Amino acid sequence: MELIYSRTKTIQEDKVSGFCPGCMHSTVIKLIGEVIEELDVVDKSVLITGIGCCGLHMDYIAYDTITAPHGRACAVATGMKKASPDSLIFTYQGDGDFASIGLAESVSAANRGGNFTVIFINNGIYGMTGGQMAPTTLLGMKASTAPKGRIAEEHGYPMHMSEILDKLTAPAYIERTSCNNPQNVMKTKKAITKAFKNQLEGKGFSMVEIVTSCPTNWGLDPMKSLEFIEEKMLPEYPLGVIRDTIG
Amino acid sequence: MGKGTIKVVADRCKSCGYCIKFCPKGVLAIGKNVNAKGYEYVEPVNMDDCIACAICGRICPDGAIEVYKN
C-alpha cells in the first residue's frame, strides 16, 4: 500500500485542535502547512496570528509563531519582515481582527505594499467572544449584538475587504476563495501557494481572503453551514482573483 | 478489494461529516464508537468501493484521514 494523503507534519502529532466540529480554521491551517512543506520553507516560516479563534493555532502548529496585539498582526509582520527579510512572514487573522480592530494597521500595511502575506478568514461573525456582529456580517444575519439581524440603517453594510484593498496602488495579489467543497479547498491551496511564492520572489503584498463558516455561532450544524456559505455568503462575497499585478 | 484503503485516526475525528458528504462512493459513515473527546467518529463501511481519490482527506478539517492506494 502506498500512502497518498495524510496529515501535514506542521501540525503537532500529539495534539488535537480545540476548534468546533466543522470549523474551517483547521482546514486552512492544514492547507498552509501543506503549502510550506511543498515549498520546503517550514524552517523559515513565521505565522503571526491575531486575537480570536485564529490565535488558538499557536498551541497546535510545529513552526514559529507570534501572537500580535489585537488587530496589529500586519504591523508586527511589517516589522518582522524588515528584521528578517529572508523569512516567510504571514499573518493569519479573522474578520474581527483584520477588518474591525485592526482596520488602520491592515489598510496601512497594504498601502505600503509590505512584502508579506495576509491570510484573512471571513466567516461573518466574531467566533471566540460569542457571536457578536463583525464588519463582515451579512444584512439580516443574526448576531448576539444584533438579535433582530443586521440592519443597514443602524449597523452599516458588510465590508468587502478585498475590494477595498484593491483600490490601493501597492498590493500585488488579492484573491477570495472558500473551503466549502473539495474544489474550493484545492483552489484555496493554489491561492495560498501563489501568495507565498509572491513573497519569496519579493513581489510585495498578497492577501488571500477565505470565506469560511462558524457553525457554533451561526447556530447551524456543519452541513447546514456549508449550505449557508453557498446560498448566503458567496453571493455577497463572490470568489475569484480580485487583483493580480504579477500575472 | 477496492483501489484504496482509508484509515481514520479516531482521536482526531470530530464527527462533522464533511468526508461523508463529499465521498463520491459512499465509503464512509459515522460509526457507533466514541473517541476520547466524546465524538462518534467516522468509520469506513464500504471499503471495496474506495477509489483512492483522497477527497475525504483533503476536506477533513482536522487531518483525521489517511488514504492509501492499494
Image: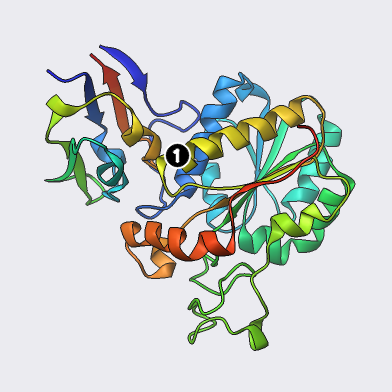
What residue would you read off at disc 1? A183
| Residue plotted at (12% across, 17% down) | B1
| Residue plotted at (79% across, 33% down) | A246
Q: Chain of mark 1?
A: A
Q: Position of residue A237 (x, y in %)?
A: 59, 59
Q: Is residue A50 left or right of residue A37?
A: right
Q: Position of residue A123 (x, y in %)?
A: 53, 60
Give whichever of A79, A212 is nearer the camera: A212
Placement of the C terminus of chain A among the 4 image quadrants: top right
Mark 1 residue crowding within 10 angstroms, few (<14) / some (14–19) / many (20+): few
Give whichever of A238, A4 is nearer the camera: A238
Q: Secondary structure at mark 1?
A: helix
- Amino acid beneath label 1: Gln
Instruction: Name which quarter of the figure residue B24 lies in.
Output: top left
| Residue plotted at (64% across, 53% down) | A50
| Residue plotted at (21% across, 44% down) | B41
Q: Is residue A158 above or below residue A18?
A: below
Res. B64 visible in picture: no
Instruction: Name which quarter of the figure residue B68 lies in.
Output: top left
Q: Position of residue A157 (x, y in %)?
A: 66, 75
Q: Is residue B16 above or below residue B10?
A: below
Q: Position of residue A16 (x, y in %)?
A: 38, 41
Placement of the N terminus of chain A among the 4 image quadrants: top left
Which colour assignment does the render follow? Answer: rainbow
Res. A144 visible in picture: yes
Q: Is residue A188 left or right of residue B5?
A: right
**So how many labels did they put on this image?**
1
Q: Is residue A224 left or right of residue B34?
A: right
